Image (cartoon, coloured by chain):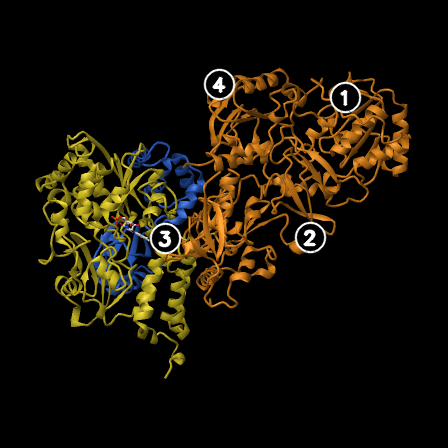
Chain colours: A yellow, B orange, C blue
Amino acid sequence: MLYNEPSPLETRVVSKRFGMLNSASLDTYLATDGYQAFRKAREMKPEQIVEEVKTSALRGRGGAGFPTGLKWSFVPRTSPHPKYIIVNADESEPGTCKDRLLMEYDPHQMIEGILIAALAVDAHAGYIYIRGEYRYLIEIVDRAIAEAYAKGYLGKNVAGTGFDFDLYTHSGAGAYECGEETALLDSIEGKRGIPRMKPPFPAVAGAWGFPTLLNNVETFSAVPEIIRSGGAAFAALGVPKAGGTRLVCISGHVNRPGVYELPLGYPMLKSIYEVAGGIPGGRKLKAVIPGGSSCPILKASECDIPMDYDTLAKVGSMLGSGGMVVMDETTDMVRLGLRIMRFYAHESCGWCIPCREGTTWLKKILTRMVEGHGQREDVALLGELSKNMLGRTFCALGDAAALPTISIVEKFAEDFEKHLKPEMVMV
Amino acid sequence: MAELVKLTIDGKGVETEKGTLLIEAARQAGIEIPSFCYYEGLTLQAACRMCLVEVEKTPKLQVGCTLPVAEGMVVHTDSATVAGARKGTLEFLLTNHPLDCPVCDKGGECELQDMVFRYGAGESRFVERKVHTDEQQWSPVVYFDAPRCILCYRCVRICNEGMGVNALGVAARGVGSEIIPNFHDHLECDECGACIDICPVGALTSGTYRYQTRPWEMRHAGTICTHCADGCRTTLGVRNDKIIRGNNRDRSGINGEFLCIKGRYGFDFVEHPERLQSPMQRVGDRFEPVSWSRALGTIAEGFATGAKCGVIGSNHTTNEENLFLARFAREGLKTGHIDHHRTGDLATFFDALSGRNEALATTGDLYTAKAVLIVGADLSQQHPLLAFQVRANVRHHAAHVYTVTTGPVREDQQAAASVRVQKGGELAGVESLRDQLKRHEDLVIVFGDAIQGESLRKLVGFGDSLGIPVKYVCLVDYSNSRGAFDMGLIPQSGGMSREQMLAASDLDVLWVVGANPLKSASLAAAGAFVVVQDLFLTETARRADIVLPAASAYEKNGTVTNVCGEVQKLKQAVKVMGTKTDLEIFGLIAKEMGIQWPVASGQWPARPAALPGLIQSAGDTLFTSGSLSRYSKILNSVMEAPGALYSGRWPVAGGQ
Amino acid sequence: MTFSPQLEERFAKMLSIYPPGRERSAVIPMLIYAQDEVGAVTRELVEEVARRCKVTPLQVDEVVGYYSMLHRKPSGKYHVQVCTNISCLLTGGEELYEHAKKKLGIGHKEVTPDGQFSLEEVECMGACSWAPAVEINYDFHHFVTPEKLDQLIEGLRSKH
Ligand SMILES: Cc1cc2nc3c(=O)[nH]c(=O)nc-3n(C[C@H](O)[C@H](O)[C@H](O)COP(=O)(O)O)c2cc1C
Ligand code: SF4
Ligand code: FES
């Protein structure tokens, strides 16, 4: 049973098996052209695989949107050291709930994607870092892995092609920051999830100091289709510089919240009003978080745009991780801002000063406001402190905390009025 | 000579080695880029963000402590943006800081205070409640006050990287992040105090120093630690003629800022209540305080009438004193029975090298050598500075370390190979490493008292046979063990060794200066007239007829020679009422005896090829120092031999 | 310390899947699975994990405080985690959390006197499109209303 009804407006590529009977079983997978792509890739030169992925214009689905083919090309495949594949299944960005489905309904698609990446970078072991809260998924993926081993699709001589690859799951234990790729590496090494200095980049010195290819679950899951039908075909589904489809997690004030697979460049308003059935009670749209809580928030008037990386950048936000949060006119942006900041203050790893102290300070100011002790100068202070964090922290979490706050201060000033101490309100 | 690059910092042209970190390049150009977490010699953190600077053609502010300079780089550290960033960072830093400077022990030498003074904002906009936790005591020396901590991670790094102890870590996360000790609520470590010393704020303070003074109320005396033979410089902070602190923040001396617990805290014996402060004469089985003139008179008589005199000198007295004593014995008392507690076979060592001084390693060589071989010694316990040098060498230059010991040693952590041998099997163990050692460009061999006599000659033979430049360190125990030998406190031309003197039933006079031979032996000559100069009424002093109150190394000027032969100056820090330096005392006795000084012959004592008698290290640990440590409160308050490190309960380094 | 055969088997596997000499990588998974069996991360467990993963207890302590799912005090037999992050907030997550507090009579990270239930307000747990969401131990519940939560809790209560 799916968590939400699919929409006829979807383009089902990576989610095409969702809803099938036993969609998570290897038999179903093989019956629906599973492992064709791997066999094809086995015939290709590693460079060709990387080229194909470049052609597909696939960009990282974890949030940063980095061109995947390019990232693969950074791994020194001829290095004498062991190389590792790491799957980022930490899915913790507020508003995001898609990797869950890919692992629950179609784990073998992800596994095949991993195997193809392994061919491309000459890796022979991989680890899927799954957030601790997803225990039931660890069990599902472990079962899928066991099944693949049993039927010869993992381990020695994968699918009879003479290629060896071992795959394991690794449980997190509750830390958003461990989704950050280098913090994840420290975490998988058994340490606190503190991000690492870059360079060196993981591709060169990653897990245990060895070359490491790290991608998001959805990114790997898109790879089999790219190899099977060709990069160009995949690219054609989307827009230039952003190929294919992506899982959009629509949540908040909509009639049919859910995860829907839509092509890159799909109109934002259409996704809200048609795919997700519009806003309950016919209320007006107030704001949209386009790709998870780390993105600057858009006013309703800014939402009439196609959803692709460049357009979102133009309007000063990001496509992020596909977590699209819709807010109607009743939404109190200050309360929302507080909840977002409580999150970042809770998740800051504490390594660097601006984020460690800044998030907590901002949280305290916002708390005071929501409790009705706001002062007018607090509004400006919120903006200023956020800017003092922005671009000055060790990793992107600091920016992720600052950006939405700045957008709230700048775009929704009126929402602060009712939170100021009455006697402070100007007449 | 590495490639040079040109860049511009604040309009100033700077030329420096490629790969230099911007923060260092700026320092070279006399421009300060403020920093907390950056610390020369320790791993980079980029955590505090104080060092943000503007680099043209890069949108974001750049982190000066991790950015390698590049050709043509144009840097601004004095722009409004940078000033704003520093101000902003400090404002964040102060939000959860208690701002309790008036009662903070660090006041006056706090880096945070200085930073805020220079780069901070005048007023605070933080009106929320601060995070607070209570102060904790982790060990006799280490106190931790979390709210003051700015999380620069210096303490963690100096303990892990510098000391190889791994006793500090970071717990929790976000604003709750906190430094924690290795055993949950307390520390089991070397108690070296390096974490306290390196803490830029008042988060880590020392139980021995805190709340005793304001730093500006002290005067300072840079002298040499009187405990082990490594010769660390320790700068003693003195207030009202009382030593209250030892450190080496100014990095003067061969040890940089390194000090172990003995050099940093082991000065408290100076004011121990049992310090001798007046000459004493035996009356029956008691001692009575007597005047100096009475005491000196009795000594002069005793010495003059004695036919067979023995003199046992000290491992702690200065070179000047040792030379003077040796001559006094030979030329004044006309005796060859002179010795001291010998802890390493220097005689054979120098003879085996037959004058090849270039084969004598310096303390610095242990930091630069491509390879170091440690034979029969627990360096971290007995020679903390040498061990520190070796660790730093491995960290900074990837040097190869080899250990040949009877038990586990901390150096095993970093060793390319560790060989465990039975006592006496050292040479065989060394031989087994021949092929590995041969491969290195150069080598320093450090060996303990297990290697002496024939085996020492064999070891030098082995080193010379490797066909690569090899230098040696012959380990000895105490602050001037080396000087005692060099200055001739050794039996010559048929003179008796220390053990022989103690065993000789016909000895008439025994003069013991700053030594405690009767701690472990007894004096055969029941009737001998015994004079002892010391700080305390030791086992030996108790047997004396006359005991004279001597000044310690911290109460005198002069020079001492460390284990590597480096001669360094002592500077008097305090004076203890009633005591005299041994040199003064020698002079007074000579005068009393009517001996004319300076004595005739000016010839330097010759180095004998071999010596009779026992050579044995006292095998002190980090927390012991011959007879002296029992008079140090601090050394007695810490756990004997760090449990966490030597019980084998846990891997010393921990997993990667 | 000894664990159930299943857990021992799991640990044995964990220690085998990382590169040689990298047993430390097993620290976090080992802690969380052990916690599920032991009930909390006790001193004893810290030292046991340290021993098995060839690290110092300090290296384990550093980790325990960092990860929000690891806790030193035992939680209830049923650990009720209510998400109040943005998507849930917008769909009644906070009201749901307040309701849970009343229903169980305990607050954030508290345990009922009978040790049956503990409550925690948690961050986004990846159920945004089916909010508000609650996770009890490791079971997700979506589109949760106060009524639905009551039923869930009663259901668990009546289990014994
Ligand atoms: C604070 C923070 C949290 C992140 N969390 C996640 C996450 O939960 N899952 C994920 O795939 N990427 C996450 N990312 C992005 C990763 O750092 C990385 O860019 C991504 O996993 C790379 O894979 P991709 O190129 O396939 O997107 C996070 C980044 C930051 C800065
Ligand atoms: S910005 Fe700094 S404190 Fe925040 S998560 Fe990144 S490294 Fe940690
Ligand atoms: S000195 Fe550069 S970040 Fe601390």
Please give the label number shown on residue B218: 2
Mark 4 belongs to which amino acid? Ser
Looking at the image, residue C97 lies above or below residue C36 = below
Residue drawn where x is 21% and y is 47% of the image? A219
Given the image, what chain letter belongs to the residue carrying mark 1? B
Q: Which residue is mark 3?
A: A395
Disc 3 crowd, CA 10 A, few/some/many (<14, 14-19, 20+): many
Mark 2 belongs to which amino acid? Met
* Circle 4: element type: loop
Given the image, what chain letter belongs to the residue carrying mark 3? A
Q: Are marks 1 and 3 on the same chain?
A: no
Is residue A238 toward the left or the right of residue A385 in the image? left
Q: x, y (%) of residue A281?
A: 16, 71
Q: Which residue is mark 1?
A: B502
* Circle 2: element type: loop
- Alpha-carbon span between mark 2 and mark 4: 54 Å
Upstream in the sequence, badge 1 or badge 4?
4
Q: Is residue A316 visible?
A: yes
Q: Do callouts 3 and 2 mark residues in contact (Cβ within 8 Å)?
A: no
